[in-house]
Image (cartoon, rainbow, N blue to C red):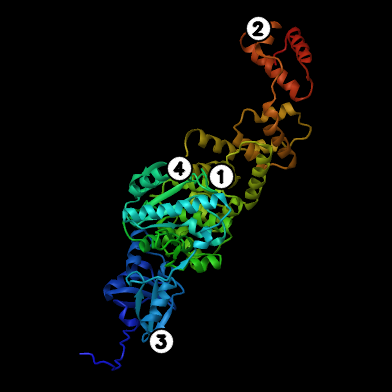
Amino acid sequence: MARPGRVYPQVEPGAAALAGGRVVACAGATPIARALDRARAAGAGIVVTGPRQAVRATELARAVDWGLGRRAVREVAWRDLPVLPAGASEVEARRCLLAGASLVLLRRAGRIVSAVDGETVALVHAESSVQGRLERAGDRHAEARFWLLRSAGKIGEGLGAPVYAVGGFVRDLLLGGEAPDVDLVVEGDGVVFARRLGEEIGGTVLVHGGFGTASIEGGRAPAGPGIDGAPLGRVDVASARRERYAGAGALPDVEPAGLIEDLRRRDFSVNAMAVALGPDRFGHLVDPLGGQRDVRARRLRVLRPLAFVEDPTRIFRAARYAARLGLRLDGPTRAAIRLAVARRSYAALSGQRLWREIELVAGEPRARQAFEHLVRWGAVSLLRTSNVDPGYLVAAERLGRWAKAARVAVDPAELYMLALLAERPPGAVGRCLDRLALTGEPRARLEAGAMAGPLARRLEAPRLPPSAVDESLRPVPPAAALSAWLRGGARARRRIEWYLAEGRAVQPRLTGGDLLALGVPRGPQIGRALAMLRRHRLDGAAGSVAEERELVKEWLTSGKEA
């Protein structure tokens, strides 16, 4: 029995109390399959691969299942892990985990003897408030969004399901920008919540069944000072979940989980933060993986060494974030990309998903820089292409700017794909388009564009009249003209720009009815006469209706066939 006034010593269990299971050391060059065998033989849950490097046996098993058994074990190891003396306090170990470490290694007499696994230790994460960033008085759009977030939190409280703003919304908030859409995560039934929120904001709810997600579009803020009827943009809602990838590049299997697990399954630390929206905690930032620290350093850090093997489309996302947000990839993230690229084959990754990523990259404000990242990282090999000349990407950016200024419709994804395929032989082009599962008209356009080298050379010829330029470009799809621009010199580019902006729209002033009245027989002769008039007008030989009438009369009397 405790006695009043007596001081009793406090027991400090130490970091070792948090450690679980055995560890085994393995040279970093050891094949992953052999390292896994050694861990299983020793009954070890952690394999130490070098100074401040280790990997879980479960992660090695996953790497073997995904065809990486012959790769060096250091390629899948966690790097730059904190190392503490085996006698360190529990508080020190928890601080390392709260700073975002996945594992904490414990050392005795110069040897790693155990490890604390962040996935098995319950943590209470410190929270700061970002409410001031959310409250931007005077900005109608920001005030409407603030109302939306408040409403979402109250609805979640009423349903007994905590709601959080997550992902890009939080990242861009901390970077000082503003995400175009709002992403919400619900610790509960996200679809039920989305329907209730849709009713509140008057939006249309679209449910995506397999992942417990939904989107709301067309919502507006209510009548009120400063926000009267302001559009709320798109709101994406998801149930908090954990994911498991049955195969490399496959879509994940999901099951309900808590918020922290949901944040851990994400791609990068800067996307693994949440802002609480419940009335009692509104504006509190939840950052279990050090995302805020990486935002300050403008660093892009992947959350797992195998993250890009799990889902190679994350490489395209990394390129977009690096280009748009000016984020710098850290060393482990670059190593993780190299590992995923080296694997090359991803049968479970559909061509449609890859093409969607190309569209997203091409739609970025700094698309050229994003594609340059993909080329530099070797990631274009996932599209079954290689040896891309960065000069073509620069040309694509310039052509895109011209097209926008000239109001010429150009598909950005098609344009950058033509840059990636420039100078590739037909067989290589076919393999790339096969990988992207492109068929029909989209495939035909890109195939024609990829073979546009002779067209570019033809358009470089001196003293080529406008009608000859038209004859070269009119029969081919616009993609071929774009590709010829990418490959051509200054003269060819000027001619293609003239054709796309003006030349292809030129038509005779006379109509088919006018030609019949002038005596041109019905049938093919009408088309030939119109083509003749168009050529003359392109070359400046006919500027008025009267001049065109005279040309038709001469054409009829001469017996020529245009």
Residue 279 falls in image quadrant: bottom left
Q: CA distance from mark 4 to mark 3?
A: 59 Å
Q: CA distance from mark 3 to mark 1?
A: 53 Å
Q: Amino acid at mark 3?
A: Gly
> Looking at the image, can residue 345 be seen?
no
Tag 2 and tag 1, C-beta contact below 8 Å:
no
Determine the residue positioned at 63% across, 39% down.
Answer: 482
Pointer 3 or 1: first along the chain: 3
Residue with the mark numbered 1: 417
Task: State which tag comes first along the sequence, 4 or 3.
Answer: 3
Image quadrant of residue 530?
top right
Vertical placement of residue 111 versus 247, above or below: below
Give the structural element (helix, strand or loop) at label 1. Answer: helix
Horizontally, is 445 left or right of 284 in the view? right
- Which residue in the protein does label 2 denote? 521
Q: Indicate the secondary structure of the residue bearing disc 3.
A: loop
Dot 3 or dot 2: first in sequence order is 3
Q: Is residue 242 above or below residue 433?
A: below
Pointer 4 residue: 217
The three-letter amino acid code for the residue at tag 2 is Pro
Please state, as top left, top right, bottom left or bottom right, where the C terminus lies in the image. top right
Q: Nearer the viewer, residue 387 or 14?
A: 14
**Identity, as a three-letter code, of the amino acid under mark 1:** Met
Mark 2 or mark 4, whichever is nearer to me: 4
Position of residue 370 relative to residue 199, above or below, is below
Left or right relative to 406: residue 234:
left
Secondary structure of the residue carrying numbered label 2: loop
Nearer to the camera, 95 or 86: 95
Q: Earlier in the sequence, mark 2 or mark 1?
A: 1
Q: Is residue 10 left or right of residue 502?
A: left
